[in-house]
Image: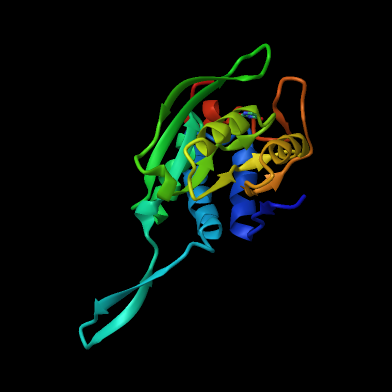
Amino acid sequence: MSNVHVIDHPLVQHKLTLMRNREASTNSFRRLLGELASLMTYEITRELPLQDIEVQTPLETTTGRVIDGKKLVFVSILRAGNGILEGMLNVVPGARVGHIGLYRDPDTLKPVEYYFKMPSEMTERDIIVVDPMLATGNSAIAAIEKLKALKPKSIKFVCLLTCPEGVAAMQAAHPDVPIYTASIDRQLNDHGYILPGLGDAGDRIFGTQ
Ligand code: URA
């Protein structure tokens, strides 16, 4: 599976296992997701370009390197994507945020768009699309199709969990978009859920089960 990056840092794997536990409360699920999102962002942003700036220390002037956080856009696929956003913004507070509202039609499992709001000047921006679960891939594929029409500099996709079916669908549709995940689970079930997975991410984040 080329262009798929499994973030297997021990802290990421540890927290993911705690999140899988059906007994985890909404409170701890949400907190763990935030922590995981921060840790994953650390890996995902590893290759971000840096620019030199002059900085005055208490002793002298020197050159330091900074990332241009404002060029980065985190795009959340609603609603579960919002559960990842806060953790990402904790480590890149200057990033802009876009939202795409897509829901899965329960019969066809196909995405239906109901909301799309992005920052301006998208041609100058690097996009990181976030959705905790890359399952059938239908929502992520549709979201990335819309985003590509805005001609951004680059697009990456981040999820907590995926499965071979989700990766294959995404790579068939968008082979140029790297996928970052904490795990590629065994399979998708007939209802579009990842096995062993962690259940419905949105319900577990927002306590709506
Ligand atoms: N969405 C979820 O929230 N969970 C899955 O397992 C698949 C899609």
Is any part of residue 27 visible from this angle? no
Instruction: Point out the image quarter for the C terminus.
Output: top right
Ligand 1 image-quadrant field = top right
Q: Relative to the observer, which residue lies in front, 202 or 151? A: 151
Residue 170 image position (x, y, % from top left): 69, 37
Residue that extends furthest to the bottom in the rendered view of this protein:
59
Look at the image and name its color scheme.
rainbow
**Residue 186 placement: quadrant:** top right
Q: Relative to the observer, which residue lies in front, 77 or 177? A: 177
Say which residue appears at 41% left-offset and 56% top-offset.
91
Residue that extends furthest to the top in the rendered view of this protein:
107
Task: Say whether residue 46 is left or right of residue 137.
Answer: left
Say which residue appears at 36% left-offset and 43% top-offset.
121
Q: Relative to the observer, which residue lies in front, 31 or 152? A: 152
Say which residue appears at 39% left-offset and 41% top-offset.
97
Q: Relative to the observer, which residue lies in front, 150 or 20? A: 150
**Residue 19 placement: quadrant:** top right
Task: Say whether residue 103 is left or right of residue 164.
Answer: left
Residue 35 image position (x, y, % from top left): 49, 50
Residue that extends furthest to the left in the rendered view of this protein:
58
Is any part of residue 168 visible from this angle? yes
Residue 48 image position (x, y, % from top left): 49, 62
Residue 107 image position (x, y, % from top left): 67, 11
Say which residue appears at 67% left-offset and 53% top-offset.
5
